[in-house]
Image (tube, grey):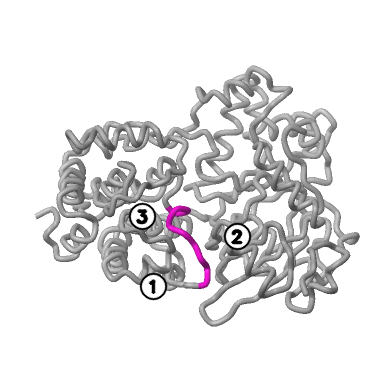
Amino acid sequence: MTVKLSLASLKDAAAKAAIPAYARESLTPGILHFGVGNFHRAHQAIYLHELFNQGKNLDFAIIGAGVLASDATMKQKLAAQDYLTTVVEQDVAKSAATVTGPMVDFIAAPDFDAIIAKLADPAIRIVSMTITEGGYFIDPATGKFDPKHPAILADAKNPDQPKTVFGLIIAGLKRRRAAGHAPFTVMCCDNIPGNGEVTEATVTGLAALFDPDFAHWIHDNVAFPNAMVDRITPATGAREIDITRDTYGIEDQWPVFCEEFKQWVLEDNFPLGRPAFEEVGVTFVPDVAPYELMKLRILNGGHAAIAYPAALMDIHYVHEAMENPLIRAFLARLTHEEIIPVVPPVPDTSLEDYATLIEARFSNPKIGDTIPRLAQDGSNRQPKFILPSTADRLAKGLDVVGLALVSALWCRYFEGTSDSGKEIIFNDASAERLQKAALESRKDPLIFLDLDDIFGAVGKNRLFRQRFGEALTALRSHGTAETLQRYLDGALGN
């Protein structure tokens, strides 16, 4: 027998899943969160769920918010099940389902006025976000705020009717200041170096376009703590919905599957107070940067490193990529020889042990994480996860054979077919121009590096250009598998 997930059916769901120990009516909102996707529901919402189960911080429930047309679909599905979510943790040795309920409402586009009104509510003390790495209007080549983006210019011209997350935050802060309410804390939960600082730069950068004085006020009065967040959370599809129904007896329209491991490292800068996250495993530190760089370069960089060779070799799942001896060995050598040597030390942490943990996490067959998910949005991810390591090595006079190969694999991927001739489906806002550059690079491999907004100074470096050209030529002449073998044998770049 299956039960349709709702507050009314919670007791029935308890037969095969853990359910909240708290009642919905005991919760009051204290957080508004932009970007209610799978990662948020498997991460921040889980930490709150665990606190609520202890009877603590019940005044920090979540109100979801979304500015994209697709967010209306998410709201509809979650509202139909009283904003409950089934989170299925899958480790190699066990699996377990938990019904979570820290969200109490959801406001989605086009109801932007309601979002601003809620942001102005003094009960909201934290505004958090998971809007993907590409959602911050940052120029990939410079790493700085792009004031010329069309969405930013539109909000600057119509600040009273904003459509972006950042325009809405500014409008909410203005209304709070006018009413005499203290500003909320803005907490970024996306994988971006210095994510709090990046968020502040975008908020103040937009405000400065139409109200420079208020931009200064934001800088002086609003907290933007940096954070490092980590949990592998694949997209939800028919597989996950079927498992949730068939294994746990719950009909959930949008369950979340994730690994057992989770991590959150956070700076403690919350002037209006915060949940006692440290009691459920969050690490508070004065400086997140070392943890953040470790994760972005080893885990996220590792994802990027295996995504494109796996896609070119027609491998669908991440754990299957790790079962391929060439890809596994490529990741290991790249990580230990080229990436770790330019990762700064992390307090009380062995980078080698961390890399071993990441390899085990990638190999988990139960997660069902996919190569297409890892390969998406490379125009934003390459400049954040791969090219910084490349730039650091070049600045130290070190070789970049493996890292240049990762970039060459990305170029080869954007030619649009795998080594077997299978069509590759792209998921990248810049896909059209990336494919155009990749196809043109068949005449001259270095044409791809003319994407200055992505490669920046790295793309002009003589050694990088040489290694990239050698790798791309090898991929086209010998295929992915043989090129990986040449790299492992030390024959690539010699």
Task: Residue 77: give x, y in percent of width and height.
Answer: 74, 51
Label 1 neighbour load within 10 Å: few <14, some 14-19, many 20+? some
User: Could one spot residue 343 in this view of the protein?
Assistant: no
Indicate left or right for 175 with 388 as reference: right
Against 224, residue 319 (above or below) is below
Residue at (58, 61) in percent of width and height: 264
Identified by mark 3, the residue type is: Ala
* Sequence-earlier tag: 3 or 2: 2
Vertical order, 219 against 302 (above or below): above
Q: Verify whether residue 364 appears in magenta.
A: no
Most foreground residue, 85 or 217: 85
Name the side, left or right, on which 106 lies relative to 47. right
Label 2: element kind: helix
Q: Is residue 474 left or right of residue 32?
A: left
| Residue corresponding to mark 1 | 356
Q: Which residues are magenta?
A: 366-374
- Mark 3, mark 2: which one is toward the viewer? 2
Which residue has dot 2 on it? 238
Residue 369 is covered by the magenta coloring:
yes
Give the spatial CA distance, label 3 vs label 2.
21 Å
Residue type (three-letter) at the residue carrying disc 2? Ala
